[in-house]
Amino acid sequence: MRKQLFVFIALLIAVSKEGVLVENNAQAAPNELSITDNRQPIAIFDAQRAFAILEKQCEFGPRPPGSIAHRQTQNYLFTELQKYANNVELQPCQYEVDGVTLRLNNILAEFRPKAEAIPPVAGVEPIGETLLLAAHWDTRPFADRDPTPENQHKPILGANDGASGVAVLLEIARVLSLHPPPRRIVIVLFDGEDYGRSVDNMFIGSRFFAQNLGKWKPDYGILLDMVGDKDLSLPIERYSWEANREFTQAIWNRASTLGLVPFQQRLGAAILDDHVPLIKVGIPMVNIIDFTYPYWHTVEDTVDKCSPKSLEVVATLVISIIYDGL
């Protein structure tokens, strides 16, 4: 039987204002992770389905901008989101680098809310009505951190660094289609995150999105990057913390409440990533990232290094925030 995550409208597990864990008498069934109250389950996150999405992306091969695999992956992701979202669009972006014109596309999907009160979100005033969920879908054109010099010019497969966050969000998209959320959800898959050898030529899609928000403007957001590692480790990313401590801490507190062990109550590194351009334009953004991944930017970033369980852990937190606020 596939491992499944049963998600309910509100948490029975909670933390009081004093930080004391409230007793939870509900018990999860074997091989299931439950967020429960006395009402009926509203959604199922399927970790095996999410992992299959990770594998599918990797079947196309390395996916750097300009490659055939990049175009094939874009078509696949766009088509999948069309099955679930109220609206899906490409956001084209041209970028000149080293005499090459990159033709990039962010993939944007909208999920409209139910007409009901929106649960509160810590650190967001007024209460945010649009939550952005983001990941990057491109992969790095060169394995510049590979320990073998002859591999350093090769493109990476990006099972974790590229496919993992996207896999979580596409499976969450299916959940949202079954049970419309209490707040508007925008999923953005950024292109061109990992292209350049310097940060000047990275985060291309997110920088373009941040300057062209239009109708897609969120009140706050969560970025997922490298969340598939079998040995998942998720300390608090420092730029997120410095930009909006209350919002960031509330997310890690929720993870603790849910018993999600990989989320560590300590500050980690400050990581330049797709959340930074949005922070710079005033959008509270939190980066959930495992930066201890030993295969980062190497040819060994492959499917066998990833785990359905890790995808499920991250999805548990994100789905809780979607339906219950913070």
Image: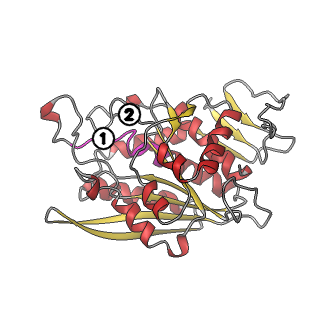
Amino acid of disc 1: Leu
Q: How far across and how far down the image is residue 145, in percent? A: 24, 36
Rendered-image quadrant of the N terminus: top right
Which residue lies under the disc numbered 1? 157
Q: Which residues are magenta?
A: 155-167
Q: How far across and how far down the image is residue 266, in percent? A: 55, 33
Q: Extreme bottom residue here? A: 214
Q: How far across and how far down the image is residue 114, in percent? A: 74, 64
Indicate which disc residue 303 carries: 2
- The residue under the point 75% across, 28% down is 28
In this view, 103 is above or below 313: below
Image position of 37 (left or right of 254) = right
Work out whether mark 2 precedes mark 1 in sequence or the reverse, and give the earlier one. 1
Decide: marks 2, 1 in contact (CB < 8 A)?
Answer: yes
SS at circle 1: loop
State the residue in front, 221 or 161: 221
Magenta-span inclusion, residue 269: no
State the residue in front, 3 or 66: 66
Amino acid of disc 2: Val
